Amino acid sequence: MSRPRAVLVSVQLPGVDDAEHASSLDELGRLARTLGLEVAFRLTQKRDRIDPGAVLGAGKLRELARLTGGDGEVPSGASPTQKKQVYVPTLEREEEAPAPPDLEALPPEERATVVLVDHDLGPSQARNLEKAAGVEVMDRTSVILGIFHRHARSREAKIEVEIARLKYLSPRLREVGGGGDRQRGGVGGRGAGESSLELDRRKIRDRIAELARELDTVRKVSATQRSRRQEQRKVALVGYTNAGKSSTMRALTGKEVYVADALFATLGTTVRVLPGVTPRVLVSDTVGFIKKLPHDLVASFRATLDEAASAELLLHVVDASDSAFRSHMEVTNGLLDELGVAVPRRLLLNKVDRLSTGTKALLQEEFPDALQLSAHDGEDMRQLAAHIADFFDGGLEELVLLVPWSQQGRLPRIHEHCRVLDQGSEATGTRLRVRAPPEVADSLRDLALR
């Protein structure tokens, strides 16, 4: 079955260079494919500002209409820079010159059936662009919302995405039917002087409030689960979406973790044990970041950020083979800093198997403290596991313990949370020499030999 065809639309504004603009549009293309669309066309324009009426200038609207089968027109007065049936080049930039008026639409089977805009659109801009294109229009936020809605698996993620979707939808509702008449309704119906549009918005507000209450309950359960892991040593994988966090997690832990070459393949937080390390270390795989993240979707990162904030080490995974990886690093670091996640970070330059020897040498000079690795290289993963163990070993405290025979039930917990260096039996109990994290050492002071 063929996938719906999409045309990507973007305006290159002053201050955005060609590489940055192309990278953003490429990312929108990956978002489109993740949503199940086929990217058929790209349409870009350089402007001093996004047109407040329909995003693009009149000429570009005609080009868009040719790709979608629309008429290229917007309601009269919708845009100060557009006039119906008039094609006069503006003086903003040369790319603003309109398309020739005699362009014919593509055959129906070749047309795009959805327009994806690499910007956030106001309700009127979206409506005007739909009128001109004659097909569905989605801005960057709605595309990301669609992906989140499709990939959310945990109850917490589903609720958060639904709240964000409803908040996005509310101002974009349109009055339909009988002209927005006002009337008094019955129980649960329209109130005095309330239009059908206002009723719909009230229903959305009520539903958001209901979901918020349910979310509070779900989060209390999540907080309880995290509290049970409080004494565990934790490391969290963070980074831009599709940087290879889940692949790294699977290679590190040897456990099955969902991996896909798609943006936002992971939306929940997965926790696994790092094998062969004592005391044991928990590794968390988290949802990836992305630039221009919709504000209301920041809430969907709460579980991820809680895991990151409670970790003792963050492994910042970066796709070093992506030409835009430096800007991806800035996005991740900026969001973590903005949200107050003050945890030590170690940079992992992933996918270096795709790079030349010379490029890797240049990256070593630029990022001397980073670990260069490939999640598909077993030796690289063993070195990463050793690095994690060394990091935590630096904070261990050595103790000599004597566990009385009457308290032998404490031995399993000691073996789970401490590195046992030596163990033997004495007349009064079991003697152990251990290295333990500070909080675990504090809980064992009553057994320590002075």
Image (cartoon, rainbow, N blue to C red):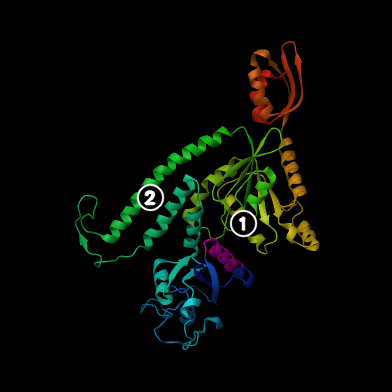
Tag 1 and tag 2, C-beta contact below 8 Å:
no
Of the 4 image quadrants, the one containing the C terminus is top right
Q: How many marks?
A: 2
Q: Residue at x 40, y 86 (%)?
A: 85
Which callout, 1 or 2, points to the residue nearer the camera?
1
Give the alpha-carbon distance from disc 1 to disc 2, as whole Å: 30 Å
x%, y% of residue 430? Answer: 72, 17
Q: Which segment did they paint magenta?
A: 23-36
Q: Considering depth in this image, is 450 or 186 the residue closer to the camera?
A: 186
Look at mark 1 in the image and give the residue it sits on: 242
Q: Is residue 131 left or right of residue 144?
A: left
Q: Residue at x 33, y 50 (%)?
A: 206
Which secondary structure dominates the residues rendered in magenta? helix
- Tell me the crowding category of disc 1: few under 14, some 14 to 19, or many 20 or more residues within 10 angstroms, Cα based: many
Residue 31 drawn in magenta: yes
Can you say whether 139 is above or below 132 in the image? above
Residue type at numbered disc 2 = Ile
Residue type at numbered disc 1 = Asn
x%, y% of residue 12? Answer: 56, 73
Can you say whether 130 is above or below 322 in the image? below
x%, y% of residue 81? Answer: 43, 80
Look at mark 2 in the image and give the residue it sits on: 208
Single out the residue that lies furthest toward the front: 1
